[in-house]
């Protein structure tokens, strides 16, 4: 265990002693699950979703001032600017699993500080803190392709969601009802920030996974209907991506017609179907190519860093899953650089 029992207890004590918490969380399954676990434990507070670039900076200071929290919890966010930290009065508790950062005046919890290989989702640690709502943590873990040590216990409690024969997160994600729950969470976070926050609030009221899967309550019906709306768009794009022939080691798919970004979702699915390929899904938006990159065999960050040389853009992420953005006019050069590095 990369976070110690003492650290887990410390986070729990910070939760239990707050009266007006503010939660910043990333717009994916791990981020939302982490927020839900902490929020449902305290039964107090407000959530702020961070869409696209996982970063908390000075533009969020106004929201902090408006709400007036006694504590701020930041979960599954890769970057927090020191200027933001310096300008808020509330204590900040930051729980993450991306590349470790050094900041002053913040309680920072990241398993990779002690073990760089411990890429364990935040929703795993939030469950260890709260010891409630295992099914929510499983959504976050499987959504981040992580197999937690309580998966076998979950199987016994929810054998219909995760069959006994399933032994890895990839199979769970693409071949089980638990995987469908991950999809529901991911697709409900699409759209505008306001729409995503509306769904996040509705998720806080869900008591069991069957409310969603079986549409047993108005809240469950709302979330499932929203999921289906975006899933239809996703299926059309996925079909086009599957027809695109790979070039050497790379399977590239570019698109521009969608109003909603499906790059992460398509990239994950293609990696499942083409495990030997480097997957690049690029969406054209506002003169930029916004990408999701995936690979099972290659360590992507150093390759991506080289590919971004001499082009206007940025990128980074985990060992086998990265995001990047380059100017549309620089994409061809970026792709050539990438091929050269491979």
Image (cartoon, rainbow, N blue to C red):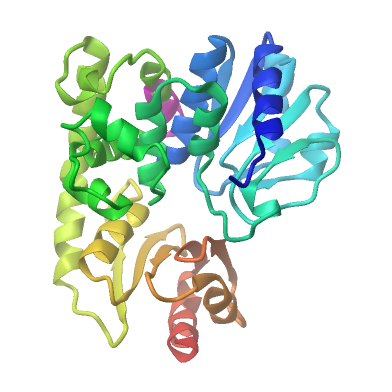
Q: Main secondary structure of the magenta part?
A: helix
Q: In which quarter of the view is residue 153 placed?
A: top left
Residue 111 percent coordinates (x, y) = 63, 48
Image point (57%, 26%), residue name? 129
Based on the picture, tell me whether residue 281 belongs to the magenta stretch. Answer: no
Residue 98 percent coordinates (x, y) = 60, 52
Image point (35%, 36%), residue name? 139
Task: Choose between 67 and 5: the one closer to the eye.
Answer: 5
Q: Is residue 26 visible?
A: no
Task: Tell me if 118 is positioned left or right of 189 in this view.
Answer: right
Residue found at the very far bottom of the displayed protein: 340
Image point (17%, 13%), residue name? 216
Q: Please state the extent of the stretch shown in magenta in the rendering.
A: 191-199
Question: Looking at the image, is 274 positioned above or below residue 179?
Answer: below
Residue 172 percent coordinates (x, y) = 25, 47
Q: In which quarter of the view is residue 211 placed?
A: top left
Question: Looking at the image, is 123 positioned above or below residue 323?
Answer: above
Image point (46%, 57%), residue name? 286
Task: Choose between 277 and 159: the one closer to the eye.
Answer: 159
């Amino acid at each position: 265990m990369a976070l110690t029992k003492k650290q887990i207890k410390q986070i729990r004590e910070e939760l239990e002693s707050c009266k007006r918490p503010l939660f910043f969380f990333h717009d994916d399954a791990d981020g939302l699950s982490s927020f839900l676990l902490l929020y449902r434990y305290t039964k107090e507070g407000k959530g702020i979703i961070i869409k696209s670039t996982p970063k908390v900076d000075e533009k969020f200071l106004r929201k902090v001032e408006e709400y007036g929290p006694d504590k701020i919890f930041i979960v599954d966010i890769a970057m927090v600017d020191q200027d933001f930290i310096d300008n808020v009065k509330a204590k900040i508790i930051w729980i993450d699993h991306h590349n470790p950062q050094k900041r002053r005046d913040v309680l920072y919890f990241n398993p990779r500080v002690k073990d760089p290989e411990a890429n364990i989702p935040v929703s795993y640690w939030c469950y260890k803190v709260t010891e409630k709502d295992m099914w929510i943590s499983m959504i976050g873990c499987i959504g981040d392709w992580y197999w937690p040590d309580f998966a076998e216990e979950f199987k016994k409690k929810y054998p219909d969601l995760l069959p006994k024969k399933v032994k890895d997160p990839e199979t769970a994600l693409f071949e089980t009802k638990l995987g469908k729950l991950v999809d529901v969470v991911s697709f409900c976070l699409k759209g505008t920030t306001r729409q995503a926050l509306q769904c996040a609030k509705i998720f806080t009221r869900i008591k069991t996974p069957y409310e969603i899967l079986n549409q047993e309550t108005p809240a469950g019906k709302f979330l499932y209907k929203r999921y289906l709306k975006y899933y239809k768009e996703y299926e059309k794009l996925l079909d086009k991506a599957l027809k695109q022939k790979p070039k050497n080691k790379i399977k590239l798919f570019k698109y521009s017609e969608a109003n909603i970004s499906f790059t992460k979702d398509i990239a994950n699915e293609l990696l499942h179907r083409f495990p030997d390929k480097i997957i690049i899904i690029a969406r054209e938006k506002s003169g930029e190519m916004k990408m999701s990159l995936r690979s099972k065999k290659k360590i992507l960050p150093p390759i991506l860093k080289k590919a971004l040389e001499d082009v206007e853009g940025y990128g980074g992420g985990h060992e086998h899953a990265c995001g990047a953005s380059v100017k549309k006019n620089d994409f061809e050069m970026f792709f050539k650089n990438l091929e050269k590095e491979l």
